Image (spheres, grey):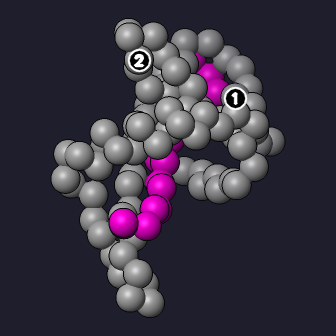
């Protein structure tokens, strides 16, 4: 298991990401926490990717399907990691936003 954290996004589609988070939170399963009397919603989603060839993965991408086409919501570059056929990567995306 590897943990990567970044605030340096090479692609960030803010309007589509906001729409994605609004839709995801409408399901009502994301916890709300309070910090210093301010409420925040914690939104955590997992995306899996399987590999059928050897290679290097140089970035992590959060995708949504819009009109049956993949739409990049966010991507951040990192040093990369090697994969071999049969590997499956799970990316866990965590967003924290204030509750209005």
> Which residue is under mark 1?
57
Residue 73 visible somewhere in the drawing: yes
- Asked if the residue at tag 2 contacts the one at tag 1, i.e. Cβ–Cβ closer than 8 Å, the answer is no
Q: Decide if residue 38 is on the left or right side of residue 52.
A: left
Q: Residue at x 20, y 45 (%)?
A: 27
Residue 89 located within the stretch drawn in magenta: yes
Q: Residue at x 65, y 56 (%)?
A: 5
In the rendered image, the vertical position of residue 62 relative to residue 24, given as above or below? above
**Callout 1: 10 Å neighbours few (<14), some, many (20+)?**
few
Q: Which residues are magenta?
A: 83-100
Nearer the observer, disc 1 or disc 2?
A: 2
Residue 90 or residue 1, whichever sits in front:
90
The overriding secondary structure of the stretch rendered in magenta is: strand
> Which residue is under mark 2?
66
- Residue 34 position by quadrant: bottom left
Q: Residue at x 21, y 54 (%)?
A: 29
């Amino acid at each position: 298991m590897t943990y990567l954290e970044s605030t340096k996004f090479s692609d960030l589609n803010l309007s589509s990401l906001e729409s994605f988070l609004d839709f995801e939170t409408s399901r009502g399963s994301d916890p709300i926490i309070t910090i210093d009397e301010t409420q925040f919603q914690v939104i955590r989603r997992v995306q899996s990717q399987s590999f059928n060839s050897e290679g290097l993965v140089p970035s992590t991408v959060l995708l949504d399907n819009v009109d049956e086409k993949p739409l990049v919501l966010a991507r951040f570059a990192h040093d990369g990691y090697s994969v071999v056929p049969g590997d499956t990567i799970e990316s866990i995306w965590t967003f924290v936003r204030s509750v209005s």
